[in-house]
Amino acid sequence: VTLTDAPLDYDPTAFTPLAVTTDVVLLSVVDGAVAVLLVKRADKPASGAFALPGVFVRPDEELGGAATRALHDKGGVTVRARQFQTFGSVDRDPRMRVVSIGYVAVAPFATVSPVLDDRRQLLRIDGDAVRGRTNRKLALPFDHAEIIAGAVADLRRNLDHSAFAFGLLPPEFSLRQLQEVHEAVRGERVNKPAFRKRLTESGWLEPTGRREMDQRFRPAELYRARAERRA
Amino acid sequence: VTLTDAPLDYDPTAFTPLAVTTDVVLLSVVDGAVAVLLVKRADKPASGAFALPGVFVRPDEELGGAATRALHDKGGVTVRARQFQTFGSVDRDPRMRVVSIGYVAVAPFATVSPVLDDRRQLLRIDGDAVRGRTNRKLALPFDHAEIIAGAVADLRRNLDHSAFAFGLLPPEFSLRQLQEVHEAVRGERVNKPAFRKRLTESGWLEPTGRREMDQRFRPAELYRARAERRA
DNA sequence: TGAATAGTGTCTTTCAGACAATATTCT
DNA sequence: AGAATATTGTCTGAAAGACACTATTCA
């Protein structure tokens, strides 16, 4: 079915197709701070500027598939993404009207680091701003700053309600690492005993029996995330 | 700027415009149950069936504006709507590819009741299903059942975190009414003293000094929602 | 043995649920 | 007075923060 011979609904004059994209915010924690994967744009507008990986949604492609494709083809990373908000201001793209469906994904630094180069960077988020390699505040094209802020807010909201946060860590991790991730995302320190008690009794964690290696002092127990929550 | 002479991005073959709509889920509480405003469709497909009020987004129209227009023109109600999720399965509309941005709104029954007639009905939500006038489960067109379920879940999540729930009540209300609304949305009873203490100390409520009238027994104090939260 | 971090115990505060008592209004 | 509901008080248990203590590892 093409667009032109489709039956019309209600008000025939109101129906004009729009450009639809997905933009993906891949978040990670680097040195105790939340960071976002940005890709240097090859094309106009804003060519050469760092921006979120995004693609136009194809007519026969699911929205989640488009998000995965954006992250894979432009970001070089293959992880699951979750829809969080849609951005569609009339003037958000200078070329034309573009509605962008925002997706958020998380990954441990080790998963992202192999693909980083001149064109792909994992940049620290400092409050509302993204800071570049030289610690300068980056001006992002379109409304990508707003999209990133929305993704971080979404991650913060869902940190406790889901297993989402484990995606920021390697498969095996210590409770200290988990706490550092929580502190980085929430932007504040948390109480150690309370955090440990809450998490170990949450049913999400499974002890591996292994411990940290190459530590200078007492090594920590390692845990992994359970696929299914358990009592 | 028209779509055809716009500059191309990255992969030129990937860019085809899609139809974009907003569908609005207006929720209210009727007789202790959550209900949704549905409108009888005038056009194909599924003409004559009850469905969510929705419109195609115009090229020069904000998304929120399209949601307001859908609710106003098709629903006959003028209230603020909030974006909650975007639905875009390839086959969700039999005519063609349509991406729909879901909005949720709330209103007291008294606001909606004047516009109800044969074509516009406020129907009770029972678990996952919508029940019609004759208490029969209604089969909704497209993925509107899924959209409604998403809106209810969103309302439930945000019941405490925002002033959103006050929109389900008239400007002045008693604590008992407020508790009934919370119970209807959450689908379970709540503890009365705890609820009262939590709400009265939340900073959202302002006593009006007035009380209920036309009650057979002791009248309850009336409150109104504060625009700004206060200590 | 000491440095440094992992992990635990205890006290206190806060908050919500359970239950019941008191207060108010109308018939 | 009595019915019926509004409002409040008290007890209890769960959970988190503050603080400090014990345990473990390596240099």
Image: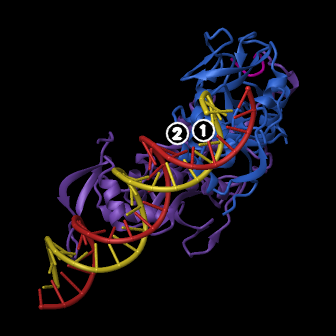
Chain colours: A purple, B blue, C red, D yellow
In this view, A21 is above or below A3: below
Q: Residue A34, how many percent across, how many down? A: 50, 63
Among numbered discs 2 and 1, the one appearing first in the sequence: 1
Q: How many marks?
A: 2
What amino acid type should be assigned to the residue bearing mark 2?
Val
Label of residue A34 in the image: none
Whether label 2 touches label 1, CB < 8 Å: yes
Q: Is residue B4 visible?
A: no
Residue under pointer 2: B190
Q: Which residues are magenta?
A: A1-6
User: On the rendered image, what quadrant is the N terminus of chain B found in?
Assistant: top right
Residue at 21% across, 70% down: A214
Q: Is residue D21 left or right of residue B110?
A: left
Q: Is A194 or A108 nearer to us in this picture? A: A194
Residue under pointer 1: B182
Residue at 52% across, 35% down: B189
Q: Secondary structure at mark 1?
A: helix
Q: Secondary structure at mark 2?
A: loop
Residue at 57% across, 35% down: B183
Q: Residue D26, how many percent across, how many down? A: 15, 78
Residue at 56% across, 38% down: A66
Rate crowding at label 1 as few (under 14), some (14 to 19) or many (20 or more) other CA atoms within 10 Å: many
